[in-house]
Amino acid sequence: MNIPFVNIQRQTKAIRSEIDAVIKQVLDDAWYVDSPVIKDFEEDYKNWQGSNYTVACENGTDAIEIALEVLDVKTGDEVLVPAHTWISTASAVVRSGATPIFVPTCSQTYVMDVSKIAELITSKTKAIIPVHLSGCPVDMPSLMELAKKYDLKVIEDCAQSHGAEINGKKVGLFGDIATFSFYPSKNIGAFGHAGAMTMDDEELYEKAAWIVNHGQSVKNNHHLIGRNSKMDTLQAAILQVKLKHIDAWNAHRIKQAKLYSELLKDSNISLPLCPEGFKHVYHLYVTQVENREEVMKKLLDKGVVTQIHYPKMLSQMDVFDTESKKGDYTESHIYSSKIMSLPVDPFITDEEVHYVVDVVKEIVD
Ligand SMILES: *Cc1c(COP(=O)(O)O)cnc(C)c1O
């Protein structure tokens, strides 16, 4: 049996007629940018997320860069980011002129260890970017208490966590601005690049909307120096279709992640944990194994594709200065060499999960 890491073809096939209809409409209208479809998508996304505003943009990395600019983060500031995340979270901080400071991450949930934040706060600290990595929420209630105490801005990087919740409240609704990516393999994926920001504050919304659109509110009326980071009509139309399915797709991911955990519970492999009351949406199902490279190769020989998210922690990368690496990353670096993500997507079948489990057990037990 061949099991790709993510089967995007199968996802498209399931909604193909709906997708074909909206693509045809976009081609017939030929209104490829700045169209009402983008506004409609922003309206739908805001309603689904439960925020007051949504600003669609070109990708999830731009969303973080723009959110930092909206919150006035600049040279001389420090921004706390997790040591373990996709590079965008920290590269956006460097591009703003500020210095990212890496917060150690937890070996069971893989997200920022909130108890390690306070010791890294200095007079220069301006903001925190928690990342709900792999779909597991960061402990936002505790993080927001610290943010309030030290007067820090909070940007939630929700690129891997559309629909994740803490005690019934969606992630992205805790901080000042939330950023989303619609990279094709994300829980809601475009047919190319796309991203968004959500927020409740009108002024933040206005500034973000201006920045993505050349600093203008209406054509040729420029309020500030912006950039061009607009979502295009085709992606907005496709995302509107996919948004109708996201809750069912997340439910399927959760069901299959539970199946993995149930079947693998007595095996020689560490399983992902999610704190009580938190809703993990399993963008990734991250395990830990000894002799990882060998295990991955044996799995591949049996047709099972696995991946590493990510082979290096930011705290292990040379592109970041030593001043970013002020924490104690021992725990993060130990699990870094063991993490291995198993295939999970909105359509993976029970039979496929059973096959992956059988092969994993054969190799590690
Ligand atoms: C995917 C991702 C991003 C960046 O999104 P793009 O749309 O690819 O620019 C940012 N942060 C995290 C955690 C991601 O997984």
Image (cartoon, rainbow, N blue to C red):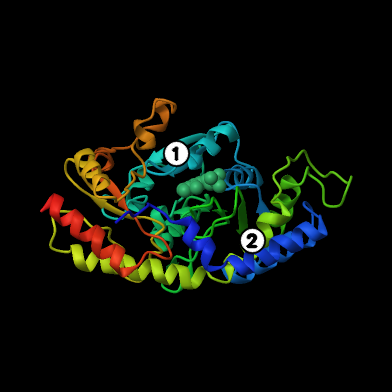
Secondary element type, mark 1: loop
Q: How many marks?
A: 2
Residue closest to the eye, 75 or 239: 239
Is residue 173 something that shows in the picture?
no
Q: Quadrant of the C terminus?
A: bottom left
Residue found 27% across the figure and 58% down from its top: 272
Residue 196 place in picture, x, y as percent: 62, 54
Q: State whether label 2 is within 8 Å of ligand 1.
A: no
Residue 88 place in picture, x, y as percent: 50, 40
Is residue 341 something that shows in the picture?
yes
Is the C-beta separation of discs 1 and 2 under 8 Å? no
Q: CA distance from mark 1 to mark 2?
A: 44 Å
Report crowding for label 1: few under 14, some 14 to 19, many 20 or more residues within 10 A (C-alpha).
few
Question: Quick one: which residue is furthest to the left in this view?
Answer: 365
Residue found 82% across the figure and 47% down from its top: 216
Residue found 57% across the figure and 46% down from its top: 64
Q: Disc 2 marks which residue?
A: 238
Asked which quadrant contains residue 81, the reply is top left
Q: Is residue 93 left or right of residue 110?
A: right
Asked which quadrant contains residue 317, the reply is top left
Residue closest to the eye, 246 or 136: 246
Looking at the picture, which amino acid does disc 2 mark? Answer: Ile
Report crowding for label 2: few under 14, some 14 to 19, many 20 or more residues within 10 A (C-alpha).
many
Residue found 55% across the figure and 38% down from its top: 92
Looking at the picture, which amino acid does disc 1 mark? Answer: Thr
Q: Quadrant of the N terminus?
A: bottom left
Q: Is residue 276 depicted above or below 106 in this figure?
A: below
Residue closest to the eye, 266 or 349: 349
Dot label at residue 122: 1
Q: Is residue 280 left or right of residue 218?
A: left
Q: Which callout, 1 or 2, points at the residue further toward the start of the chain?
A: 1
